[in-house]
Image (tube, rainbow, N blue to C red):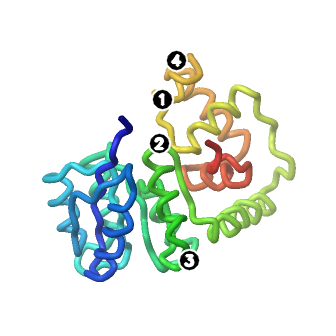
Amino acid sequence: MSRTFRILIADDHAVVRQGLKLLINSQPDMTVVGEAADGAAVLQQAATVEPDIVVMDLSMPGMNGLVATRALKEARPSVDIVALTRHDDETFLQEVLRAGASGYVLKQSNPTEFLQAIRAVAAGGVYLDPAMTSRVADGLLTKSSRAREVTPTPISERETDVLRLIAMGHSNKEVASRLKISVKTVEVHKANAMKKLGLTGRVDLIRYGVLQGWLYDT
């Protein structure tokens, strides 16, 4: 029997929460275990219902979704977060990814994008709304064009394997298990590859993954 993912919905609009609840509960592999109207309630609910995934609106009163994402990842690192927002701005995307979210979906998008994001994140991956990927890629290309090194140092096949899995959302331990190498070796390959490519953090790494088409691999 396949696993059913426990989902907590955070949105300050009751109508939106109800719509999301109906959509999620219509799926055989998902169930809504709680609802919250602001960031503080998210933290309280997460401690009580122990969700696998939190669907997080960014624009909520009091503690907003971005602050709540940071706090939740600190308190419960194993909980995955999918940001659901109307903001199609790369600044919001960058901040949410830095805060620890693994998914970013626009409210304007088709419901299938939302469901796909939940399943991708539940599988340990990262999911960005397709409407955002061109902006993310453009951001990295613009940054690269400003860099002194026109041609980055090529990375090895093993470094590519490590970077791809990390960009997709896997932990160092998971990468080590998949590639049958030590966690320390994963850390070394990751550091060397990011240095060669001029990548400085999680946002840069996800951007690079978008350019390589890694984020939507199965």
Residue 131 vs 168, above or below: the answer is below
Tell me the amino acid under the disc marked 3: Asp
Query: x%, y% of residue 162?
Result: 62, 32
Number of other residues with Cα within 10 Å of mark 3, as a class: few under 14, some 14 to 19, many 20 or more: some
Q: Residue at horizontal 46%, vertical 27%?
A: 173
Q: Secondary structure at mark 2?
A: loop
Quickly name the residue at label 2.
124
Q: Secondary structure at mark 1?
A: helix
The disc, 2 or 1, on the residue closer to the chain's N-terminal end is: 2
Question: First in sequence: mark 3 or mark 4?
Answer: 3
Q: CA distance from mark 3 to mark 1?
A: 31 Å
Which is closer to the viewer, label 3 or label 4? 3
Q: Are marks 2 and 1 in contact (CB under 8 Å)?
A: yes
Q: Amino acid at mark 4?
A: Ser
Alpha carbon distance from label 3 to label 2: 24 Å
Across and down, in percent, residue 144 comes to 77, 58
Residue named by callout 4: 182
Q: Which residue is mark 1?
A: 174
Q: Amino acid at mark 2?
A: Gly
Horizontal arrangement in the rendering, residue 184 relative to residue 9 (left or right): right
**Front tag of 4 and 2:** 2
Dot in front, 3 or 2: 2
